[in-house]
Image (cartoon, grey):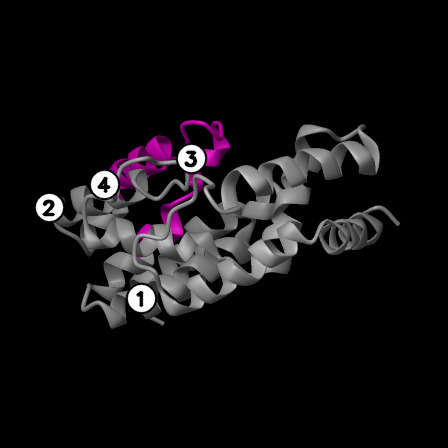
Amino acid sequence: MTNLQLYIEQSILPQYDAFDGGHKRDHAEAVIRESIVLAREHGADEQMAYVIAAYHDLGLRYDRETHHIRSGEILMADQTLRKWFTEEQLLTMRDAIEDHRASGKNPPRTIYGAIVAEADRQIIPETVIARTMAYSAKLYPEGGFEALYARSREHLLEKYAEGGYMRLWLNSERNVRSLEALRAIIRNEPQLRALCEQWYQTNNP
């Protein structure tokens, strides 16, 4: 393990432990793994992609609406990173973090923004549904299953269904295939409800 990896593992990734169920350390680690794969495929710097992915959601410590901006600020304020990256590289990494948000209407400014945005999508149907239910539960802790399901289904339709606001900037084969599978579940309301019920029962024994 390099000194950079050791720093990320010991000082950065543990911060995700305080976030909601959809954005804990396992999420950051999954985005890191996919970002490195995509960086390799597109000839980008793997270390930059690694750090961008590690920092991309740290701004959630403040709020969700501006977390992408806050995450970029956290990266730029981290003086330790200057051991390994130039100012120019850090600015590129900040821009990428700012551009990763799924609701962003403009294309990412660099390949690094496209990489972390694509990696962050994590369109594994069961994972998307679980993350959506977990976030709904955070917003409506006393709502019961019906309230959680209604909110979650509305969000899934808004974001992932045909015409939804989520965009794939690189159209990686993995995400395209997984998005088609997720849309099929969203169209099949009994199947979607069953998966949400399964999550609810597991997390509310």
Image coordinates for residue 203, horizontal then vertical, percent: 79, 49
Q: Earlier in the sequence, mark 3 or mark 4?
A: 3
Q: Nearer the viewer, mark 3 or mark 1?
A: 1
Report whether residue 83 is seen: yes
Q: Which mark is residue 95?
A: 4
Residue drawn at the location 18% of the way across and 46% of the way down: 92
CA distance separating discs 1 and 4 = 18 Å
Image coordinates for residue 114, horizontal then vertical, percent: 28, 52
Magenta residues?
A: 51-79
Disc 3 designates what residue? 59
Q: Earlier in the sequence, mark 1 or mark 4?
A: 1
From this viewpoint, which residue is outermost toward the right? 205
Image coordinates for residue 182, horizontal then vertical, percent: 57, 57
Residue drawn at the location 15% of the way across and 50% of the way down: 89
- Amino acid tagged 4: Asp
The majority secondary structure of the magenta stretch comes to helix
Residue 163 in the magenta stretch? The answer is: no
Residue drawn at the location 66% of the way across and 39% of the way down: 152
Q: Earlier in the sequence, mark 3 or mark 1?
A: 1
User: Based on the displayed image, in which of its 4 quarters is residue 137 positioned?
Assistant: top right
Q: Which mark is residue 88?
A: 2
Q: Nearer the viewer, residue 160 or 38?
A: 160
Disc 1 designates what residue? 38
Q: Horizontally, is 138 left or right of 81 in the view?
A: right
Question: How many numbered discs?
Answer: 4
- Amino acid tagged 2: Glu
